[in-house]
Amino acid sequence: MSPSGRGVVLAVSLAACAAGPAEPGPGREVEVAGGASASVDGLVVRFAEVINDSRCPVDVQCVSEGDATVAFGLQAGGGEETLVALHTRDEPREGVLGSYRVALEGLRPRPVTSRSIPLEEYVATLRVRRAD
């Protein structure tokens, strides 16, 4: 990429930040912190808990990447909340509620051996889209 191309990307990114956080639409990624919620086109996604995090710690060399299981509360149109458990590596990585599909794309931070991670420090990256 040319230096002038990088400037265009930076300018677009800065303009988006200046406008404030946008509410993502279906088919887009959203980040949700542990214990928090996000609203996406009528769907509320709540990061309820990390059920298990057996991913390889950053300060260890592992043979396997490992997996984390995360519970999310999904609520559409003011209805009752439904809990789904999604995985970072194993199945299921995607949950369905009504006309919505929610996929767990990533979870950070990665574990470390020296301490446990409080729920509030986790951030899940989700892809939300309409089910066909």
Image: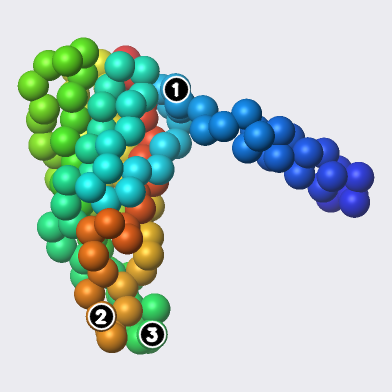
Q: Would you call the spot at circle 3 few (<14 residues within 10 Å), some (14-19), or many (20 or more)?
A: few
Q: Nearer the viewer, residue 117 or 67?
A: 117
Q: Which residue is mark 1?
A: 25
Residue 16, given in percent of the width and then of the height, sits at 65, 33
Question: Which image quarter is the C terminus in?
Answer: top left
Name the residue at 32% across, 60% down.
Answer: 121
Q: Is residue 4 left or right of residue 118?
A: right
Residue shown at 15%/63% (left/top)?
52
User: Of tags 3 and 2, which is closer to the observer?
Assistant: 2
Disc 2 target residue: 115
Check disc 2 and give the amino acid type.
Arg
Q: Earlier in the sequence, mark 1 or mark 3?
A: 1
Amino acid residing under circle 1: Gly
Q: CA distance from mark 1 to mark 3?
A: 36 Å
Pinpoint residue 124: horizontal percent, then vertical percent.
Answer: 34, 49
**Left or right: where 69 falls relative to 64:** left
Dot 1: element: loop
Q: Which mark is residue 114?
A: none
Other residues around mark 2 within 10 Å, as few (<14) / some (14–19) / many (≥20): few
Is residue 51 visible to us here? yes
N-term-proximal mark, 1 vs 2? 1
Which three-letter amino acid code belongs to the residue tagged 3?
Answer: Asp
Disc 2 secondary structure class: loop
**Between marks 1 and 2, how big is the CA–CA gap?**
36 Å
- Whether the residues at callouts 1 and 3 have beta carbons within 8 Å, the answer is no
Question: Looking at the image, which residue is at 33% across and 33% down?
Answer: 38
Tell which tag, 1 or 2, sits nearer the viewer.
2
> Left or right: 23 with respect to 81?
right
**Circle 3: element type:** loop
Q: Which of the numbered marks, if any, corresponds to residue 59?
A: 3
Q: Position of residue 64 (x, y in %)?
A: 30, 74
